[in-house]
Image (cartoon, grey):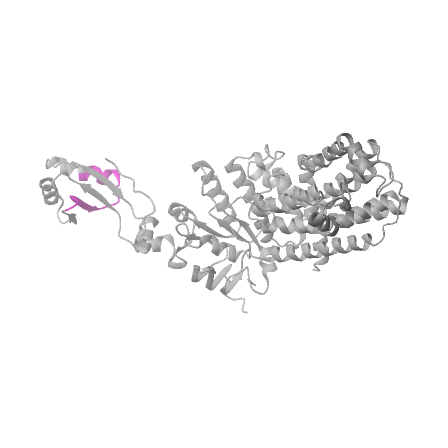
Amino acid sequence: MSTFPHAVNDSATMLRRNLRHLRRYPAMVMMSLGVPIVMLLLFVGVFGSAMGAGVTGAVHDGDYIDYLVPGIVLMTAGYGSQSTALAVNRDMTEGIIARFRTMPVFRASVLVGHVGAAVIRTVASAVLVVLVALLLGFRPAADPVGWLAAAGLLVLLVLALTWLAVAIGLAARNAEGTSGFVLVVQVLPFLSSAFVPPDSMSGPVRWFAANEPFTPVIDTLRGLLAGTPVGGSAAVAVAWCVGLAVVGYLWARALFRRDPVR
Amino acid sequence: MTTTAPQPAVRATGLRKSFGDHVVLDGIDLEVAQGAVFALLGPNGAGKTTTVQILSTLIRPDGGDVLVAGRDLARDPEGIRAAIGVTGQFSAVDDLLTGRENLVLMADLRHLGRAAGRRRADELLARFDLVEAAGKPAATYSGGMRRRLDLAMTLVGDPRVIFLDEPTTGLDPRSRRTTWQVIRGLVADGVTIFLTTQYLEEADELADRVAVLDHGRVVAEGTPDELKRRVPGGHVLLRFADTTALAAAAAVLGDAPRDEDELTLQVAGDGGVRALRDLLGGLDHAGVEVAELSIHTPDLDDVFLALTGQATTVKESVR
């Protein structure tokens, strides 16, 4: 009996399980979708013209919404990873995971199921956010290749955040234990080029915003969607995503291999 | 390996496990014959759950050899997993899925195939009286229903060895009876059962063999009857209001052991109605007033008290 088909079968079974959770409890999707959409409305409708006056012209041609959307998409990915950390943590603290561990099941399938469902959920959320943005006047100038590249980068970013979230969910003793991670993914977009260019910030904040991982990802997405050259930020963005994904994966794997403590 | 003597379903030798400085299992040996019901009896913190977790491949032992269903734990944990079913102390159901989806999930993970898996799920729903609740999320189930679903999930893959960690803790008496019936049914199918319990009554009721675990050591092992034989037999305990009454009763009852401080007399006997009537009639006839009477039948409780120095339950008493 070869183990490869089992690995695929078991992972598919676990993915079905996680997707069924989503279908049954769409509240989780709604929550991770709600905040980015509110932000979008807030920054377009309320702060839009004031922010736009400062941003457009200086570094960006066109409407402020065209500047804003990549950051909001990234926030969507961040909020999605929060749900992932919580879902993994809930799974680990309930008895069902102990049952899986005493069954002849491909070990990593539990994590693969979570990661697969999280990527599907988060990418779907991001697509919805982009659709809302299009209704609000977002006018990207990207060609099909640009869209494809943007989608690829988004998936890569979601993968990186998801593996990190899985590791956090495994490491935390309870749901409250994931709150540190939640705070980081909530705050990082504000200290990045999501809403205003880092050049307009001051001192250490500017340095941080220019060098944190979200900024190159946002800049690259923005360039791809606007159809403008992305320069060196693409390579930096991909490197960050791959690096974080690998770290998250290795960390999660090590945590999952531990004997469970109860 | 010879095939003449049937191999035990579970064999553990020198099993050790510590969490930090805390020694939980201090070298225990266990052997469970195929098709038997084995009860690991002990108070909270004795190491029962840890033993089950090790035998069911959930956690690794620090030392010792384990053989389950003929597979070696260190070399072939996956082989053990294919042969066992585990129902832990905490319910291991997926709250967000319905009862039926939980069972189908187990069937899929056991690779039963689509049609066979669904058939098995429906069969178990009927057997565990969950047909009506099959389409509801497990989160809405009562405690007893969750336990039943939990046990049903354990049975999906037709395991040959089943571990049950305190299967009836926290259940109402009716659900407990139902669980016992299910366990007896499994035994009839030739399944080996390894269960842990704090209830002496449960071990007595179900088990062929009982091991008493205390502070990480097996302090006694044998059939429930063998264990009962190790403690003093049944008696009726009579208490009197004063030494005069005690002396008068002692005169009537002859050489029954007496306790002057406690004002009690211990009369050998099983506490049956006829024997009691004769006993009390004799005392009444002699004009002796009995202040209090308690019937003491030997059970695993006495074994426990004798072996570990810890009482576990309160005796029934008649006043």
x, y percentage for residue A67?
Answer: 81, 40
Furthest-right residue in view?
A143
Q: Residue at x 32, y 48 (%)?
A: B311
Residue furthest toward the top? A45
The quadrant holding residue B136 is: top right
Left or right: B225, with B103 as reference point:
left
User: Horizontal and vertical percent for residue A50?
Assistant: 78, 33
**Residue A119 image point, x, y percent:** 73, 46
Q: Which residue is painted at 69% across and 41% down in the image?
A: A79
Per the rendered image, the range of residues in magenta is B261-279
Please give left or right for residue A250 compared with residue B163 in the image: right
As drawn, the residue found furthest toward the front would be A203
B306 vs B279, nearest the viewer? B306
Nearest the viewer among B62 and B269 is B62
Front-most of residues B62 and B317: B62
**Residue B76 sits in which quadrant?**
bottom right
Residue A190: image quadrant is top right
Report if residue B269 lies within the magenta region: yes
Q: Quadrant of the N terminus of chain B?
A: bottom right
* Residue A86 pos. (x, y %): 62, 43
Image side of residue B277 versus residue B170, left or right = left
Q: How many numbered marks does the figure carry?
A: 0
Residue A116 versus residue A239 in the image, above or below: above
A239 inside magenta stretch: no
B126 vs A216: above or below: above
Q: Quadrant of the C terminus of chain B?
A: top left
Residue A30 seen in render: yes
Q: Looking at the image, can residue A13 be seen?
A: no
